[in-house]
Amino acid sequence: MVEKKIAYTKKEALDFLANHDAYIIAGGSDMMVIKKNVAGYAPLFDKDVLYVSHIKELANIYEDKDGVHIGATATMHEIEHHKLCPSLLRKAISEVASTNIRHFCTLAGNIGNASPAGDTIVIDALLDAKVKLESVDGVRLVDAKDFVLGVRKIYRHPNELITELIFPKIEYTGELWFKVGSRRADSISKVCFAGYYEVKKNVVTKFACCFGAVAIRPARSKELEAKVVGLSLEELKAKQPQIAGDFAQIIAPIDDQRSNKEYRQTVAMNIFNKFIDDIVGGAK
Amino acid sequence: MTSIKFRLNGKDVAVDLDPSMRLIDVLRDHFSLKGVKEGCGEGSCGACVVLMDGYSVNSCLLPLANVEGHEIVTIEGFKETKQFDVLQKAFAEVGGSQCGFCSPGMIIAAQSLLSHNPHPTEEEIKAHMSGNLCRCTGYQAIVQAVEIASKKGAGLW
Ligand SMILES: Cc1cc2nc3c(=O)[nH]c(=O)nc-3n(C[C@H](O)[C@H](O)[C@H](O)COP(=O)(O)OP(=O)(O)OC[C@H]3O[C@@H](n4cnc5c(N)ncnc54)[C@H](O)[C@@H]3O)c2cc1C
Ligand code: FES
Ligand code: FES
């Protein structure tokens, strides 16, 4: 018999996970679709289930020396409207699913779901966020970019709960979030892109970008980013085709029901070039 | 089976059902609230939208477990309010409802918007209502209906 537990405190959740290999449900916007049954019947779960959305102590959003901490049960709606949260994250969230769904789905659920088309995992990777995992054995911090291992695969031990995501504070002068989907709501990304930069005295002093939905995991190369830092805006303009060519190598789009790989490759690089044009043109 | 308690249309209720049941099934089958419609069953159409603590949510995605202790209002409960009256008249005035299948979800989504943003711009209305699909009206009338309700119901929200 499958056991179903509603946790009200973190301790209750961790104690349950210590003794049960369980599905975790936060908002349920992924899990309730994946486990859907026919109308009128409860979804089918082949193992125990832990409901975490009532854990209030994990709904906090606060800032300390490590950055902004976003609790695992805070809803996307709360994050979208919270001034402390990074602006790129808020922009990306404003285009996740629909307002109705954002009223109850979570950021932890988005990375927990590990879909290649997940939007916020691109921001997590770009902003060097850390995933905090807790169990009865202790606490672990994992870089968000290493947490997603593959399609619906994450680096979580069965007794662990994601308790928060931590975003270090990053100062920069310009940013871009760009999502291509088929309609405004329920628009799963065909391609998405996030980037930030800083330009001082005509020289690029910070540069980072990450592509989504064009590889199994968010695609970012700190090595290639480092080659852009230090270039003057004129040099950046002159080297743009070569730089774009290098970045094109880090993505590996596939054909699926939403679009084909050629379309994705072209659109991804068009957005990348727009990002470079923004920098060269002095856009904020 | 654990007993799940919540407020439904202004009354305290308790149900002894599987906590993983979808809220939509509990509302339609257990409480006979048939104004909650099932279109897609996957979060895409908004026909099943109800208010949870004043915010529109898709009842086809919500497990009963997540509703414990919260306040749920369906179109049947909302029908008793002045705000409903204004919204219903506005939808009727511009033809914002034709076959009517999407209308309970549309009205609930509009209430969620107006109660947090009483004077939304056209862009804000479109963005907010984009999770609710309509096969009949072509949306323009729905956006207009929300604009009219916002004006005629000024002070209510
Ligand atoms: C119609 C529709 C449109 C959508 N559109 C988008 C979109 O545009 N962009 C996008 O990125 N996503 C989209 N999604 C997917 C989904 O809404 C997001 O992935 C959402 O963030 C999931 O959050 P949740 O809390 O509802 O997750 P749940 O379904 O509760 O959980 C998702 C996964 O995360 C795990 N999990 C959740 N919380 C924890 C925790 N604390 N610790 C460990 N594991 C945890 C769960 O076990 C599960 O594997 C859409 C979904 C639907 C139904
Ligand atoms: S039935 Fe719930 S969104 Fe379509
Ligand atoms: S009026 Fe028919 S679906 Fe909207």
Image (spheres, rainbow, N blue to C red):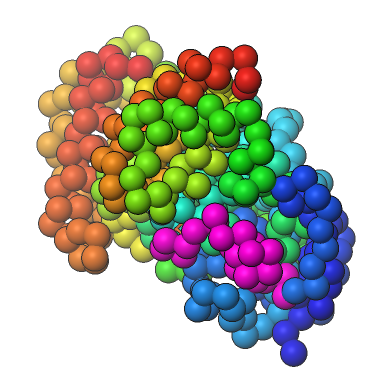
Residue farthest to the top, as pictured: A201
Q: Is residue A270 visible?
A: yes
**Looking at the image, residue B35 lies above or below residue B142:** below
- Asked whether A114 or A38 is in front, the reply is A38
Residue A187 lies, with reference to residue B81, above or below; the image says below
Q: Please indicate whether residue A95 sits to the left or right of residue B36 in the image.
A: left
- For the N terminus of chain B, the image quarter is bottom right
**Residues shaded magenta:** B18-41
Residue B36: x, y in percent?
54, 56
The answer to whether residue A178 is left or right of residue B57 is left
Q: Quadrant of residue A64?
A: top right
The residue shown at (22%, 45%) is A268
**Going 62% across and 59% down the picture, which residue do you hit?**
B33
Residue A13 image-quadrant placement: bottom right
Q: Is residue A277 left or right of residue B140?
A: left
Q: Nearer the viewer, residue A181 or B119?
A: B119
Left or right of A63 in this view: A197? left
Is A171 covered by the magenta stretch?
no
Q: Residue at x 33, y 35 (%)?
A: B95
Quarter of the image where the C terminus of chain B is located: top right
Q: Give residue B137's position: percent from left, percent from top.
A: 29, 42
Looking at the rendered structure, the number of numbered marks drawn on it comes to 0
Per the picture, the main secondary structure of the magenta-coloured stretch is loop
Is there any visible trace of residue A118 in the rendered image?
no
Depth check, front residue: A77 or A236: A77
Using the image, determine if residue B28 lies above or below residue B140. Answer: below
Q: Position of residue B86 (x, y in %)?
A: 53, 27
Q: Image point 71% across, 79% down: which residue?
A: A48
Farthest residue toward the bottom?
A1
Task: Find residue A210 and report its horizontal and vertical position in percent.
Answer: 37, 44
The question of residue B37 being in magenta is answered with: yes
